[in-house]
Image (spheres, rainbow, N blue to C red):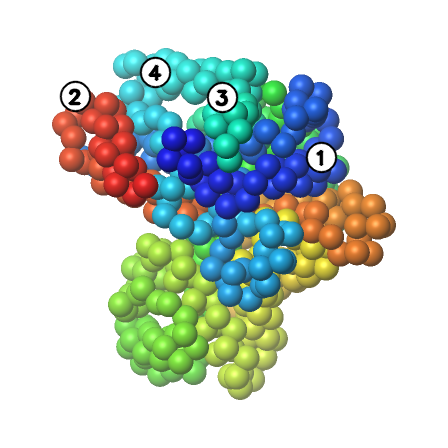
Amino acid sequence: MALHDKISSCLLGGGGLETLSTFWSRYRVHFPDHPLFRDHGHHLQFCLPLLMHADEGRYLKREQLLIMSWQSMIGEGTRPQRDYRSEADCRETQGLNFKGSSYRTRFLLATLLSLHYRKKNRDGDRLKNLLNAVVDDFLEFYRAGVEVVFQGTRIKFYGILLNLKGDWPMLSKLGNLKQHFGRKTKGGAPTEQSAICHLCRAGCAGYPYHEFEINAKWYETYLQRRPWSTPSPFMRLPMPAAPELFFCFDMFHVTHKGVLAELTVALLDMGLFVPGDIPTRLDKIYDDLKSFCRTSGVSLHLTRLTRQLVGLKDDSCYPSGTWFKGADTAAICKFVEHTFGQLTAPAGFELYCECIHLAAEASNTVLSCMYTSGLWLRPMEASAIARHSLCFARRFRECSELAFQMEKCRFRITPKYHAYVHLTHAVIQQLGNLVDEVLENDTPAILNPLSYSCQLDEDYIGSIAMLSRTTTTGHVHEGTMNRYLVTLQREW
């Protein structure tokens, strides 16, 4: 990067060393016990805040390829932020790592075929050895740093790996987590082993995970016990007092592929107003959806709506949006808000339709506020996000309860609903860490939940997986890395 003069654009969002000083001064308010402030407190302007991402991409013959990459937490922002905010505001709030080619903002660490870690009797330690090697590299970057020439001066940068992000199954695998979504009881009473969350005991007896209020019973168990019996190799890294937070929930999978995908099944209830069988209704709804997106300038990738895409195998199923593009979920949520805000509900459905409209309205407000903001939220923005997030959680649960009373299979409350509440509570908790002066001046100081989003990383995984499919199985790891380096050179 230094040889190509890419450090500023790839790791600092186009800024200079003052960008790092500002970042760490704000980060310290929320994580004052992080060892980096003891080890590198005298040169924080040379410390890079890094994230690691891991996910599986498709290889040949339905085989999966584990792809690990790293990236800076600071980027050039989002397109909505650049469109609606002034240049001065963008510099002050800094940018999310969303803009630009993923080859210029994400960097490949390693790949590993799933056959090496899914079969316990074959190369059982291969994944563990790989993780240890990755951790060794990050430890060396943390302790020894890398000396480069930056803006005409020879300096030494230090890499600080702050979090691992990915979908929930990957976090559970790489973190050796014993408390995860797979623990949810499918029948019978919950037990002490039923915890679905690595941050608390939600799901255990006496701690229902569907509670969202500040005084939820599970909140008293927040960060009270370790969610693993054998620590992950990542625990060798310098960690704050609560290492569970290293494994962070991903806003993209929690919303676009989670609770909002459950909300979009409100499309089916437009059948209250559209005659015909389900395929006929879906065709009519899709025509209205396409017209709405064209009129409002919203991108839509769907070419039609089918029973399969809405997860409606039969009338006893709980449907959910299963389309490939997460951006379509956001588009449909806007359509749901628009449509249910104008409909005249039939007798007996007034409250049901009102709750759907209010849930969609709250979710759209939350996403709009986050995507138009920077890496650091102002207190007023964070307060609005927290308020509307809690409103969505409340209305979504009301939709679920009303659907149950009407004997409709709608609006499942899944473990991702609980993860969504955790992301909301994190914003509220960071608001509580601020001093009065910051609140009064509305200074950017709260981490945007999108900073841990995997939205752009999903495209990156697809690109690397496509490169891997041009290699042979015997040389897939080396071949993928070589093809990646060639592509990276072309991008730069």
- Is 466 left, or right, of 300 in this rendering? left
* Residue 299 seen from this side: yes
**Label 1 close to label 4 by CB (< 8 Å):** no
Q: Which residue is mark 3?
A: 146
Marked residue nearer the N-terminal end (3 or 4): 4
The structure residue drawn at horizontal position 52% and vertical position 73%, both measured from the top left corner, is: 337
Q: Which residue is mark 1?
A: 28
- Is 443 left, or right, of 97 in this rendering? right
Given the image, on which type of amino acid does mark 1 rest? Answer: Arg
The structure residue drawn at horizontal position 78% and vertical position 42%, both measured from the top left corner, is: 433
The structure residue drawn at horizontal position 37% and vertical position 67%, both measured from the top left corner, is: 299
Q: Tell us which disc is closer to us: 2 or 3.
A: 3
Distance from label 1 to label 2 (Cα)? 46 Å
Q: Which residue is mark 4?
A: 126
Quadrant for the N terminus in the image: top left
Distance from label 2 to label 3 (Cα)? 33 Å
Nearer the observer, 52 or 219:
52
Given the image, on which type of amino acid does mark 2 rest? Answer: Gly
